Amino acid sequence: GNSVTQMEGPVTLSEEAFLTINCTYTATGYPSLFWYVQYPGEGLQLLLKATKADDKGSNKGFEATYRKETTSFHLEKGSVQVSDSAVYFCALSTDSWGKLQFGAGTQVVVTP
Amino acid sequence: EPEVTQTPSHQVTQMGQEVILRCVPISNHLYFYWYRQILGQKVEFLVSFYNNEISEKSEIFDDQFSVERPDGSNFTLKIRSTKLEDSAMYFCASSEVRGQGNQPQHFGDGTRLSIL
């Protein structure tokens, strides 16, 4: 079956550091890939998405490229801020009804 | 920006009792979902709903669970006889159209369900 694996947290960084969160997937067919973010006390918000191989999703300084050859969708940001502290979820969908399958989530803590 | 709202934010219930979790999806959305996250575990899909019927459900969504859209705006999840293992954060989501991500799902802030 389909699955998403992402690096375990917490990831602790200083402000302005470079952030990478690894995400790999197993899927039949051609999934769409997503990163969702959950700020403390809030719901899941779509951060970015990519629907086909080699697409790059980007938003708020974050980027991720859909790599079919390595079945990966790693999230990167060049210079993090304290406000980026959150839990980040990688997810995929292959389902015509849009069902999302999530990774375990990675907590990111950015210190001043 | 329109948002999905869920009530209550926290529900505490005795084991064996029925509980109803409520969601108001975004008004022009047609596809509705429930997910749950047990503490420390992954967010898991429960059910999707379209045109007043279940379109897909997971193995978690057994006979104790039901969903309905009673009045055209609310979307509810009912657990008939709660168990301790039902304790989790429950998220409602909606999307304008279905499909593989061309229209993303918008999530509510969740209802934390605690079973005693």
Image: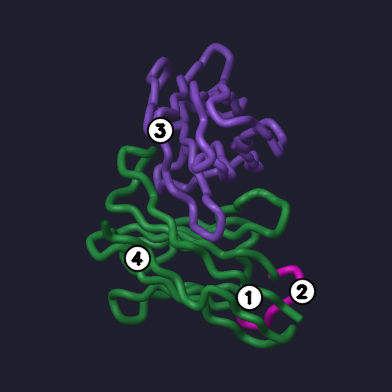
Chain colours: A purple, B green
Residue drawn 49% across the image and 27% down it: A29
Residue A2: which numbered mark, if any?
none
Chain bearing mark 4: B
The tag earlier along the polypeptide, 1 or 4, is: 4
Q: Secondary structure at mark 3?
A: strand
Q: Secondary structure at mark 2?
A: helix
Magenta span contains residue B84:
yes
Chain bearing mark 2: B
The tag earlier along the polypeptide, 2 or 4, is: 4
**Residue most extreme to the top:** A69
Which of the two marks, 1 or 2, is nearer to us in this view?
2
Real-space Cα distance between discs 1 and 2?
Answer: 13 Å
Q: Secondary structure at mark 1?
A: loop
Real-space Cα distance between discs 2 and 4?
Answer: 28 Å
Judging by the rendered image, the residue that carries numbered circle 4 is B25
Amino acid type of the residue tagged 3 in the rendering: Lys
Real-space Cα distance between discs 2 and 3?
Answer: 35 Å
- Label 4: few (<14), some (14–19) or many (≥20) C-alpha neighbours in 10 Å: many
In-image side of B40 versus A55 (left or right): right
Kindly indicate whether the residue at mark 4 contacts the one at mark 3 (C-beta within 8 angstroms): no
- Label 2: few (<14), some (14–19) or many (≥20) C-alpha neighbours in 10 Å: few
Judging by the rendered image, the residue that carries numbered circle 3 is A49
Please provide percent x and percent y for residue A101: 56, 43
Q: Which residues are magenta?
A: B80-86
Judging by the rendered image, the residue that carries numbered circle 2 is B84
Residue B115 visible from this viewpoint:
yes
Judging by the rendered image, the residue that carries numbered circle 1 is B64
Real-space Cα distance between discs 3 and 4?
Answer: 21 Å
Please provide percent x and percent y for residue B7: 47, 76
Q: Secondary structure at mark 4?
A: loop
Residue A23 visible from this viewpoint:
no
Amino acid type of the residue tagged 4 in the rendering: Pro
